Image (cartoon, helix red, strand yellow):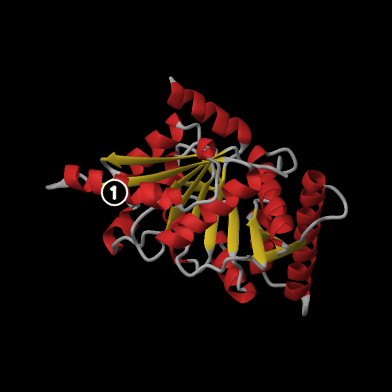
Amino acid sequence: MKRFKNVLTVYDLTPGGDVTLERGIALARRNGARLTLLHVVEPGAGAERFVAERRRVLSRVASGIDLAIDRMDTVVRQGGRAAEILRCAGERMADLIVVSDEGGDGLSRLLGTDTVADLMRHAACPVWVVRPNERRHYGQIVAAVDAGRPDAQSCPSVHRTLELAASLAEREGAALDVLYAWDFQGRERETLQSELPPGGHDAMVRAARFRHLERVAEVTRAVLGDPVPGVPVVGRGTPEAVITRHVQVRRADLLVMGGSAGAPLFDAFTGRSALRLLHGIGCSVLISRPIPLAAAADRRLAS
């Protein structure tokens, strides 16, 4: 199933740049998409000279890519990295941005001012954050969704996340886990903390876990059909802790999560915990966007 028509790949002369380039090329080929290679030169002394030199580099790189010339172009921009990526994505009507995890210093990550954080907040289309050491072919994909929300079966973000993850798992021949992080809330939490008869605590936890597993299966079935093309999984705790633990235990190659343009949101949690997860998790991350949201953001960029 073709998911993308215009793939924007940010090519940096860094250790992870070639891996990111390979992923962008593979996605463009599989989807019959147009591929744009973008390199951003930060402002500073000698920037103009670097722009000319990087144009020559990208031209040589592009000449070695086996794609039709009318399906590929190169762009070199001077300016702030995140701003230029977002501007180019809007101009080229990109429906996927492929970018390396640049690392960044501790302060930029703490403040959420690095490139990936800015793209997570403001990109209208999905953002694929590639790790330098990722495997060429994925064996395990994890889709993290908020299956507990009342409108989960109709939520555009949940739909887009599950559809993207299932499509990629099918293409890669990878296993798919559909993960939901839950915890006791309100009266249930109060009951759990009260004095219960022997075995009452464990019975309550088992019943809740089974209920949430059923919920994940129902949501996945409603979106992707039956039989469900993945394994429903739940974990008790914060989304950050549950997702990190599950990705590590399963040695996942890719985490697919929902996000909302205009705010540092993942589906089930916000702010610094999302940024910590994004930077601290060991696998590549695909931040999806619901189609109506992406279309609306595209219109804002065009205007």
Front position in the image: 34 or 103:
34
Taking the view exactly as shown, the residue that stands out farthest to the bottom is 198
Taking the view exactly as shown, the residue that stands out farthest to the left is 45
Q: Is residue 269 visible?
A: no
User: Which residue is pictured at 57% across the width and 32% down the height?
Assistant: 293
Total number of numbered discs in the rendering? 1
In terms of image quadrants, where is residue 158? top right
Q: Position of residue 165 (x, y in %)?
A: 67, 53
Q: Quadrant of the C terminus?
A: top left
Q: Secondary structure at mark 1?
A: helix
Front position in the image: 148 or 191:
148
Q: Is residue 23 visible?
A: yes
Q: Quadrant of the N terminus?
A: top right
Q: Amino acid at mark 1?
A: Arg
Q: Is residue 108 above or below residue 161?
A: below
User: Which residue is pictured at 32% across the width and 60% down the height?
Assistant: 104
Q: Position of residue 97 (x, y in %)?
A: 49, 45
User: Which residue is pictured at 45% across the width and 23% down the height?
Assistant: 302
Left or right of 38 on screen, residue 136: right
Q: Position of residue 24 (x, y in %)?
A: 52, 51
The crowding category of the residue bearing disc 1, from other C-alpha atoms within 10 Å (few below 14, some 14 to 19, many at least 20), is many
Front position in the image: 167 or 76:
76
Left or right of 242 on screen, residue 78: left
Q: Position of residue 7 (x, y in %)?
A: 52, 42
User: Which residue is pictured at 77% across the width and 80% down the height?
Assistant: 198
Taking the view exactly as shown, the residue that stands out farthest to the right is 226
Circle 1 is placed at which residue position?
Answer: 54
Left or right of 277 on screen, residue 40: left
